[in-house]
Image (tube, grey):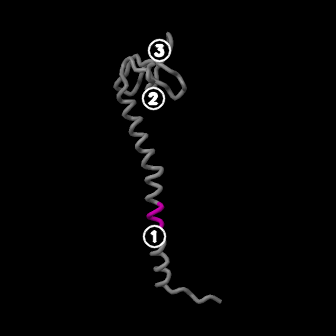
């Protein structure tokens, strides 16, 4: 029969585990959460910087040209002869000409 653990030994075990939890939590932050926040911020800046004439790629895979941008978050794109209305969040990236 094992001897009952004392309260002081349980506190000692807990104090050994806490630094490991903090290290793993910090590693998780720097390896996954922080880069995701950075990408999100860059995407938001891209969407705010759109102007008429920019060539863009939408989430649906359309290559289009920005025709008009409104203050309420809508963007009008020209795809061939058609003009389509999108939300700014639908823009994935700007496309380099050439």
- The residue labelled by disc 1 is 18
Q: CA distance from mark 1 to mark 2?
A: 42 Å
Task: Say few, some or many: other residues with alpha carbon within 10 Å of mark 1 (under 14 / 14 to 19 / 20 or more).
Answer: few
In the picture, the quarter occupied by the N terminus is bottom right
> Between disc 1 and disc 2, whose residue precedes?
1
What percent of the width, then of the height, locates residue 78? Answer: 46, 15
**SS for dot 3:** strand
Residue shown at 47% from the left, 19% from the top: 64
Within the image, what quadrant is residue 96 found in? top left
In the picture, the quarter occupied by the C terminus is top left
Magenta highlight range: 18-24
Query: Image height check: is 45 above or below 52?
Result: below
Magenta stretch: includes residue 23: yes
Circle 2 or circle 3, nearest the eye? 2
**SS for dot 1:** helix
Circle 1 or circle 3, nearest the eye? 1
**SS for dot 2:** strand
Residue shown at 54% from the left, 26% from the top: 60
Q: CA distance from mark 2 to mark 3?
A: 19 Å
What percent of the width, then of the height, locates residue 40? Answer: 42, 40
Q: Which mark is residue 83?
A: 3
Residue shown at 42% from the left, 49% from the top: 34
> Between disc 2 and disc 3, whose residue precedes?
3
Residue at the far front in the pictured view? 98
Q: Which mark is residue 68?
A: none
What percent of the width, then of the height, locates residue 35? Answer: 44, 46
What is the magenta segment's predominant secondary structure?
A: helix
- The residue labelled by disc 2 is 93
Q: CA distance from mark 1 to mark 3?
A: 58 Å
């Amino acid at each position: 029969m094992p001897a009952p653990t004392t309260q002081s030994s349980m506190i000692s075990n807990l104090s050994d585990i806490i630094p490991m939890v903090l290290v793993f939590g910090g590693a998780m932050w720097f390896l996954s959460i922080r880069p995701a926040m950075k990408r999100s911020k860059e995407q938001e800046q891209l969407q705010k910087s759109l102007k008429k004439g920019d060539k863009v790629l939408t989430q649906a895979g359309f290559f289009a040209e920005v025709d008009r941008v409104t203050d309420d978050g809508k963007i009008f794109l020209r795809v061939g002869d058609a003009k389509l209305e999108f939300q700014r969040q639908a823009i994935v990236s700007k496309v380099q000409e050439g």
